[in-house]
Image: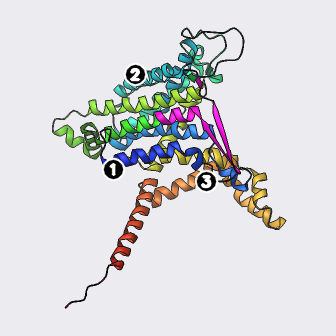
Amino acid sequence: MFGLDTKDTRLFFFVAVLVAFAPFLMNPFPTESGLAQFNGGYPDLMQRFVIFGIFAIGFNILFGLTGYLSFGHAAFLGTGSYAAVWMLKLLTINVIPAIVISTLVAGVMALAIGFISLRRSGIYFSILTLAFAQMAFALAASVLTPITGGETGLQTALNDPRILDFRAEGGNIPAPSLFGLEMRASYEWLVGGWSFTFNVGYYISGLFMLAALYVAIRIFRSPFGLMLKAIKTNQNRLNYTGVSTRPYTLTAFVISGMYAGLAGGLMAAMDPLAGAERMQWTASGEVVLMTILGGAGTLLGPILGAGFIKYFENIFSKINDSILHSWFSFLPEGLENVMVTILHPFVGKGWHLTLGILFMLVVIFLPGGLMEGMQRIGKMFSRKKKSDETDGKATVPAE
C-alpha cells in the first residue's frame, strides 16, 4: 500500500493510530487522581512529541543510515524557526508558506554547511558541524539582531506587513492558522473523571510527522538508502571500487537538514516565536540522545526516543517537594521526609539526573535502544506462543 510492503505498511498505520489516539493514550489517569501528574495529553507536550519526532527522523537518515554524527543540527532547526516567523510577519499568518519556506531555507543552509563539512569524516566532521552551529548561534544571538531579534527573539507583531492578508486596525495579534483554523484551537471532551483535549495544531503537526515518516521509509527501502547503508558499513571499500560517495552523503545531509527545518517551521507555526537558544549545542545533543535512545538506524526508534525525552522533560521536571509530600503523606512524618529527601534530586530541576541514569541503563543493557527492548519482548512472547502450540499438539501413538 502506498508503495510500501506489508511490514512497513503495518508500521506506518501503527504510528498513525498512536498519533490519532494520543489524547486518550496520554491521559490514562482521571483528572482528580493523584497520578494525574503523569498525564501528558495536553496540547503543548503532544505537539513537542510529533515535532521533535520529525527532527529525530531526519537526523536518523544521516546518522542511522550513513553513520555521520552531526553535532550541529540545531542550526537548521533554528534557521527554520526564524524563516517561518518572518513568513508569518511578511506574507501571511497562514502556516503553509511558513512551513514550506522554513524547509527550503534549512535545506539551502544544509547544502552550504554539508559541502564544507563532508570533506572530512568521523570526529572531524562532527567538530565541523558543531563549529558551524555555534557560529550560527552567535550570529543569531548578537550580530544579526535586526533579523533575529537577538536574545529576546523574533516574534509576530500587530503592525507586521502580512501583504497577503487583510489587516484589521487594532485588535490582537493574529494567531497562526491554516485557512482560518487557528493552530491553538482546542476541543475539550469530559468523560467521567477524564478530560481529553483535541488540539488543531497537534493534529496538523501529526500529519506532517506521518508524511515525514512515509518519506523516511521510502528512503530506507530505496537503492539510495542501500547506498547510504553501504557507506556506513565500509566507505573506503566503496571509494576503492570507484564509487563517489560524497554526492550520497551530501544528499543525506541536505534531506536531514530539511527535516530539521520542517520541525523548526512547525514550532514557529504552533508558537510564533523564534530564539537563538534553539541553535545551541544542547539542542543538537538532544536529538542525538533521542536517536540513540530510541534506536539509531530503525524507523520507529527516533520517534520513541523523542517522546521519551520530551515526556521526562515536561513531566518529571514539574514534580516538586509539595507533590512528593502529597504522595507520601500516608507515611509517618519522619519517614515521609526521608522519602522526599531521597527522591528530591531526581525530580524537578534534577530531572536530567533521572534521564541520565535511564540513558546509561539503556546503553548498557539495550545497545540497540528502546526498539531492541521491544524486539526482545516480542521474541519472548512469540517463543512462548510457539511453545504453547507445541505442548497443545496431541501425540499420536505408534501402531
Most distant residue in the bottom direction = 399
**Viewer-proximal residue, 116 or 267?**
267
> Which residue was labeled with disc 1?
7
Residues at marks 3 and 2 touching, judged by CB atoms closer than 8 Å: no
Most distant residue in the right direction = 333
- Give the residue displayed 74% in from the left and 52% down from the top: 32
- Give the residue displayed 52% in from the left and 42% down from the top: 20
Total numbered circles: 3
Check disc 3 and give the amino acid type. Thr
- Give the residue displayed 29% in from the left and 84% down from the top: 395
Rendered position, 329 above or below 36: below
Could you tell me how far apart the alpha carbons at marks 1 and 2 are, in whole angstroms?
34 Å
Check disc 2 and give the amino acid type. Val
Residue 291 visible to an observer of this rendering: no
Question: How many C-alpha atoms fall within 10 Å of the one at disc 3: few (<14), some, or many (≥20)?
Answer: some
Residue 183 within the segment the image draws in magenta: yes
Where residue 293 sits: x, y (%)? 48, 50
